[in-house]
Image (cartoon, helix red, strand yellow):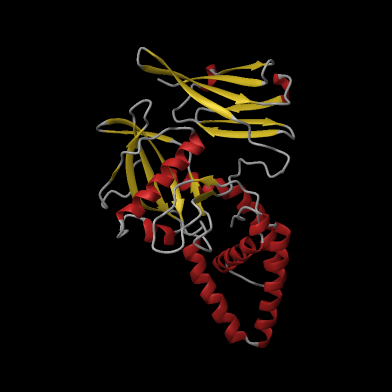
Amino acid sequence: MAVPDGVDRDSMMKQAQSIWTMLDEMAENNPQAYRKFIDKHMTEGKEYMKPAEPHMCVMTMVTSTKRRYFINFCSWNKIPEPKTPEDAIPVAGTRVLQDKDENGEFSYSGVAFNPKILEEFGIDCKNSSDRTALINLAIDYVHNQHKITLSRSFSILPSTTKFKGNILSLQKALQSQKQNEDDEFDEQLSELEKTFGLQGCGAKDSLMNKLANLSTEDNAKSNNTPNIQLPGLSKEKPAKQNLIQEMNSTNQKPSSKVKVPEYNMEEKFKEKNLEELILTIKLPGVNKVSECELDISEDDIDLTVEDLYHLNVSFPYLIDDSNASAKFNKNNSSLIIRLPVQT
């Protein structure tokens, strides 16, 4: 399982060891209660381990190109729910993907929320303004993550069409965000399992998910994860603080010294056809291009400046990465990257 933002891993492991010590004593002194406890958490664990499931799909368009864009809203148990109405709404998202249908090519991505959020504000929401607010949250999220401006005019696809694009690709993209963290953390938990005799992956994941939620509450005051200011949801209860919280990505560097640099992505056209993307990254404190470690693929770019910056950006279109070029401007410490779009 993934550890939420702001959670101290060492603290979680100490709490886990304490819980498993308690279970070890329960197994010895009250085997029936122990078995009931394990069976309950194995059942819950199976639900927790399910992949993200499509909930509804919204169609809008990229304002600069008029290209259709579909946002797939997914329900995922691995996304925690807000603890109070004032808390941020956790969300995880995928990179931008491409596909085509009988009407031509289109772009799409996925956003995953806790099932209870979608039950309250999703497709079956009784208050349409609440559903509209959630959709606008997702549109702002896409803009913040991918620097794509989407139209606020949208349509919700019929309930019989819960997703657009390849659902397996969406599920894989969401899962891959946390896979490295999952593998590392599960390795530590497996050692504890061997020590304390708690068997069953489902039980472990469900139990540790609850532990993670407890740890999130304990660490709330020291959580430095940035939140995105977005419109609130209009329920007849205390207003939310208009926040949406991005779940951790494996591409982000954990060091507090490393920052995400400012950047801007522009689209360059030739005779009304999109020719290339121009990505400008501001790197104050960097004096030469040799300090930058740059990795460009057809769908994203990863930049690292040791102990200073780290940036990972998904492209809205597939890039001809073999013909990409980068130039460093010493006058303003900016890296300018030209990214030809595949035709």
Q: Position of residue 268 (x, y in %)?
A: 44, 17
State the residue at coordinates (51%, 57%): 78
Q: Is residue 35 above or below residue 324?
A: below
| 237 and 56: which is toward the camera | 237
Q: Locate residue 342: give its quadrant.
A: top left
In-front residue for pair 202/240: 240
Is 222 above or below relative to 15?
Answer: above
Question: In this rendering, does residue 194 appear at all?
Answer: no
Residue 21 visible here: yes
Q: Nearer the viewer, residue 74 or 279?
A: 279
The answer to whether 190 is drawn above or below residue 323 in the figure is below
Up-down relation of residue 103 to residue 266 (above or below):
below
**Is 319 left, or right, of 333 in this rendering?**
left
Q: State which quadrant residue 29 falls in.
A: bottom right
Q: Quadrant of the N terminus?
A: bottom right
Q: What percent of the width, then of the height, locates residue 141?
A: 47, 42
Q: Position of residue 255 (x, y in %)?
A: 72, 43
Describe residue 19's horizontal placement relative to residue 63 as left or right.
Answer: right
Residue 124 location (% of width, % of height): 30, 58
- For image coordinates 33% across by 52% down, the residue present is 129
Give the quarter of the figure containing the C terminus.
Answer: top left
**Number of labelled discs?**
0
> In the rendered view, does 15 fall on the left or right side of 173?
right
